[in-house]
Image: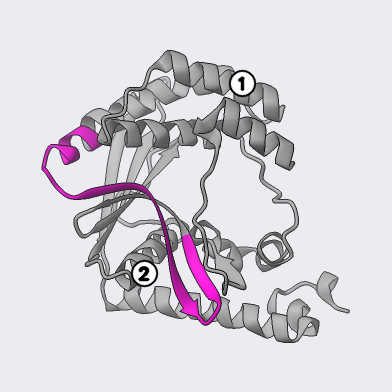
Amino acid sequence: MSDDVKQRIKEECPIFDYEKPVFPDDCIFNISPSQIDMFFSYPSVWYRENFLGQEQSFQGNTASVTGTIAHYIYKCVTQKIPVTREDINAQLMRYAQIVQNPDLDVNQVMIDYPLVTAEVVNNYVIPQDAKGMQVRCEDLIIAEVLKGIYVGGSCDRLEDDTVVDYKNVGKLPNQDVIPFNYKIQLLAYAYIYRKKGFEVNNIRLVYGVKPTKTIPARCICVNEPIDYVADKLIGDTLQLIAESVLMVKENPRLAYLIFKSMDFKE
């Protein structure tokens, strides 16, 4: 996405302007919590997009845009910011005109987001906010892993000692465990908050489940405590990524071995 397109999005449809944390001048690399799973699942793609800075293969679709709108609504509800469907739809139309993404079905987004967000707002956001807890929304947070290597991103929600992430899904999820790709992202946010002095003991995934022909939209919460194993997992994972980055910076010829692709062999 070009800088001109990004600027137009920022000015004309700010709902879709993705804010990023500001890293210190000594930062030589920043680890994105949402990209950690890719480091293990698709190491060569992770290397291209995160280390080499090549254009990301995923440019958004109907589901991701619906999720962006949902996140915006949840934040507005908690922070008591007035929001209307008319304004959201107008920004969505402008966004679609700007990005010209064939994977974005605007009409489907307009159908999906009111149904899903109503469930999550009424069954999670409003009841939780009513408890009077300390809540932080869309927090831009960073922490240093090794000298010059940081981890940072935007955390959906922190309420008391629990890190919360919202996900929109098209089918009923496993309600017993948080999937690894989501869990490692939540643990990364918990790691950052702990580094900043917050007491964080739990992670929570709040699903907004799209309706089907036979099942209405639902809100489902899955909770997990941060035990010793989870704490060690995220610490070791971030250490591994940071050391891998430093090793390739010092010796680029090792990239093909570390990121498992002969394409990087010099």
For marks 1 and 2, the one nearer the N-term is 1
Which residue reaches farthest front? 25
Work out whether residue 192 or residue 103 is closer to the camera in this orientation and state it: 192
Q: Which residue occupies 47% across, 62% down?
A: 152
Work out whether residue 229 or residue 17 is closer to the camera in this orientation and state it: 17
Image location (x, y in percent) of residue 160: 19, 55
Residue linked to disc 1: 94
Q: Which of labels 1 and 2 is toward the front?
A: 1
Q: Which mark is residue 36?
A: none
Look at the image and tell me in which quarter the C terminus lies: bottom right
Quarter where residue 259 is shown: bottom right
Image location (x, y in percent) of residue 190: 33, 64
Q: Which residue occupies 59% across, 29% down?
A: 11
Work out whether residue 75 or residue 113 is closer to the camera in this orientation and state it: 75
Image location (x, y in percent) of residue 57: 71, 49
Left or right: where does residue 254 sit relative to residue 199?
A: right
SS label for mark 1? helix
Left or right: where does residue 241 sit relative to residue 207?
A: right
Q: Colour scheme of this structure image?
A: one colour
Residue 263 seen: yes
**Extent of the magenta region:** 125-152
Work out whether residue 65 or residue 3 is closer to the camera in this orientation and state it: 3
Which amino acid type corresponds to the residue marked 2 in the rendered image?
Answer: Tyr
Residue linked to disc 2: 191
